[in-house]
Image (cartoon, rainbow, N blue to C red):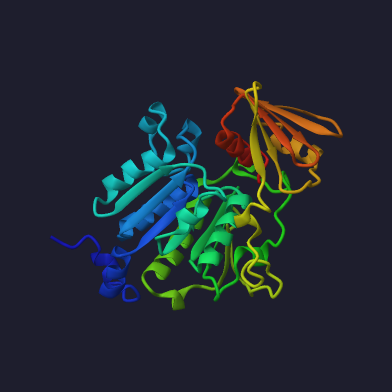
Amino acid sequence: MPDRYDRQTVFAPIGPEGQARLRASAASIVGLGALGCASSTLLARAGVGRLRLYDRDFVELDNLQRQVLYDESDVSSELPKAQAAARHLAGINAEVAVEPFVRDVNAANVRAVVSGVGLVVDGTDSFETRLLINDACVEAGLPWVYAACVGSAAMSMAVVPGKTPCLRCLLPVMPSPGSSPTCDTAGILNAAATMAASFQAAEALKILAGRTDALVGGLFCADLWSGSFDLLPLKRSPDCPACVGRRFDHLSGAAGGRATGLCGRNAVQILPAAPVAVDLEGLSGRLASLGKVRHNAFLLKFALDDFEMTVFNDGRAIVKGTDDVARARALYARYIGT
């Protein structure tokens, strides 16, 4: 009987030594949406020894278009994504130890998320969480691989602290809420998600197999609808507050937003780290096709299904219809963006 990894070990850049390294390695995957599903599948099939899975959400019907690990039984069972992903990955490769964690990754627990692994894989949909991962990994000297997708666009880059630029070299200031499209406001081509995840998984395998010399050293960008592909060379910023200045604003919570339940109101208030100017008219246009929207010069109200979100022009929001802080943060990230 052929070995499970025959086709991979015969690939010279990995070989038997690289495969043994993969078997002995561990990775944390944060976020199990479209990116995390595809990346975790590829890493499990490649024989990465241990995968820790983190996600705060549950499987819904509209996930199935692009989140390739799940099926309709996960939807009908209302399974948390981490649990559903762990079950499917165990069926793909029983040799891989899979540990699911149904939780929100935040400043209070992110050090535990990056501890005891050789790599972190970004499957999130939030700049705030990505910058938090960046802080934690740069502080620990741990590699991580960023990826993102929206519409038909895909991008990814590997971060190796001390050797490559980190995410704050590119984003010294967090984008304002509502300033960037999300999958819920701009849509997503499922092939764009798997393209970003494929590049991400390849960079992750290089790191875990001990072949960091083969990293591409830039930001991979593609648009599958227009057929454009590019690799943008990047340099470490001499003014980067994280990898140069060793100032970890997101890790300390100084740069992260805050969310608190509002007693007796079945609502959660979300505060950005600092007041920002939100383009309420532009945000209204992006949300108009998704639910009921109305706005004035001071605030925007967006109602969909069983929740209503009021967004103020300084980035603050009140999410009515839930007292679950993690759920409110997820809704804010989904529709407002960060």
Quarter residue 251 falls in:
bottom right
Residue drawn 59% across the image and 26% down it: 322
For residue 17, above or below residue 47: below
Q: Position of residue 300 (x, y in %)?
A: 77, 32
Residue drawn 65% across the image and 50% down it: 256
Look at the image and tell me in which quarter the N terminus lies: bottom left
For residue 135, above or below residue 68: below
Q: Position of residue 116 (x, y in %)?
A: 40, 60
Q: Is residue 332 visible?
A: yes
Whether residue 181 sits left or right of residue 200 in the image: it is: right
Q: Nearer the viewer, residue 255 or 224?
A: 255
Q: Is residue 153 visible?
A: no
Quarter residue 331 falls in:
top right
Quarter residue 293 falls in:
top right
Q: Nearer the viewer, residue 58 or 273?
A: 273
Whether residue 92 sits left or right of residue 27 in the image: it is: left
Q: Nearer the viewer, residue 147 or 23?
A: 23
Tally the numbered discs.
Answer: 0
Q: Nearer the viewer, residue 46 or 222?
A: 46
Q: Position of residue 307 (x, y in %)?
A: 63, 25
Q: Position of residue 75 (x, y in %)?
A: 42, 30
Q: Residue furthest right?
A: 297
Q: Residue furthest bottom?
A: 213
